[in-house]
Image (tube, grey):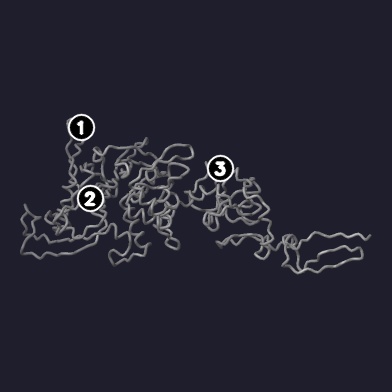
Amino acid sequence: MSKRSVSPDLSGGPERKKRVQISDTVEVRVIEDRPSVQAEVSNGKHLEFDDLESNKEDEFITSKNRKTAPVADTPSDLYLETVDRRRLDFDFEKLCSVSLSNVNVYACLVCGKYFQGRGRSSYAYFHSVDEDHHVFVNLQSLKVYVLPESYEVKSTTLDDIKYVINPTFDKKTVASLDRKPIESLDLNYKPYRPGFVGMNNIKHNDYFNVIIQSLAHVSPLRNFLMLESFEGKAELVQRFSILVRKLWNAKAFRGHVSPHELLQHVSALSKKRFLITEQADPFDFLNWFLNNLHLALGGSRTRTRSSFIQMIFQGKVRSESQKITAHADAGDRLRFEADTQIQRTEMPFMFLSLDLPPAPLFQDDVGKNIIPQVSLQTVLSKYDGSTTQELAGDRKRYKIIEIPPYLIFHIKRITKTNLLDEINHTVVTFQPNALDMSPYVEGATEPIIYDLVANVTHETITTPQGEERHAYRVQMKDKSRDEWLQIQDLYVESIRREILFLNESYIQVWERRK
């Protein structure tokens, strides 16, 4: 009886052409028309470095041979027990820790480091071999792979990690944020309140933190950033949207957020005007940030209310000015004269600046400066249309003719000089509810009620080296509980509404009552 032997079928499927040769010993051998996958790899055809300038998924197997890759034969949950969620932090800039490139970046789910690519010559591949770390996630597509085998993981056990990288919300959830109290637990089972979490002060970026926290509680802006897709939009809008969604994430791994990713982009976009390592003025940053958001959302430099930002914050004020002549009465220089021409202009605004009375020069009995108090209505009288002030040889008065849904007040207490900052410590007293703006709006016949949303406060502190520096914190209202919380960097604490005014208010955000 003749001996028959069959060599293994390396064709990989019936679609390949084969030539069968039968020898005298009835031995069947398969001869390929082209080299096998193993031969191609040994010839070095697919071992070149990945195309790192492309966002395409990099693989060392060609698309024609991908059908023969043994994905189905590999268990999809291999190495998943090595994933360490406590070491993962997705708030930082998405840059490869070796090449510092932001193209095609993967995060190691074992140690949390970022690497570029996943092909056989990539940094992620070398990391998987050298450190025995095998599970990686693409930070853009959110696909999870096991290296060095380079197969995709389909397990749903990693969905919580994908959600932390890019939190998403539906309309129903967003609509309930201000009505339904939410309290979550982090990985250490420590409770935190979504929307009211601390932000890292990496160096001197507290000026940045208080503004981002305040804007994240302007409901229309917050809902817009949570629900809209900004794919293809400006990087500033995308990063701000992700940061706001992380602030309100009820499934976070830790009860605080780092603004590093957005702050890095702001630093580059502002040409180093706003940095991590140097403290800036919160109002200067707010002014710059809102105007750049307006432009990033397609807003016009000339047309009013041409973006979502201006629809929320922009109003219009009328200014009347008159030259102060030499024969004006010295005792009544601020009185408008009927026989002198009055110039009227209408100007759009996104902020209303409020002037404080001069700080007193006298001291009390114990040798300390007397800190005066002034009501918010008193400093708002600047916009009643009759109160006059002198500025650069002109007498001026103002009246609001269009009022926006959200008002931003800038209380001018810091005056910058060449040598140092002069600070007016006058306390502005106010009630956080039911501010009536009708006395300052032209043609208003009924009350126009506003409620306080956020209050940015200023404090002067002395460092151990004896230097004075600014410290900023923000007080915000939790509408779902009707409570007030105060946040300074990572510290979150409750505060009574009756003592809000005792701090040196610097920037306030007010919401028009519907």
Q: Secondary structure at mark 2?
A: strand
| Image disc number at residue 493 | none
Dot 1 alpha-carbon crowd within 10 angstroms: few under 14, some 14 to 19, many 20 or more = few
Report the quarter where the N terminus lies. bottom right
Residue denoted by label 1? 367
The answer to whether marks 3 and 1 mark residues whose Cβ atoms lie closer than 8 Å is: no
Q: Residue furthest top?
A: 366
Which is nearer the N-term, disc 3 or disc 1? 3
- The answer for how far apart the CA atoms under marks 3 and 1 are is 58 Å
Left or right: 238 in relation to 77 = left
Residue denoted by label 2? 450
The type of residue carrying mark 2 is Tyr
The type of residue carrying mark 3 is Asp
Left or right: 476 in relation to 170 = left
Q: Position of residue 512 (x, y in %)?
A: 24, 52
Residue 294, picture quadrant: bottom left
Residue denoted by label 3? 84
In this view, the residue in front, 201 or 68, is 68
Dot 3 alpha-carbon crowd within 10 angstroms: few under 14, some 14 to 19, many 20 or more = few
Left or right: 165 in relation to 75 = left
Q: Position of residue 276 (x, y in %)?
A: 41, 48
In the figure, 46 relative to 134: above or below? below
Q: Residue furthest right?
A: 1
Residue 239, picture quadrant: bottom left
In the figure, 333 relative to 366: above or below? below
Which is nearer the N-term, disc 2 or disc 1? 1
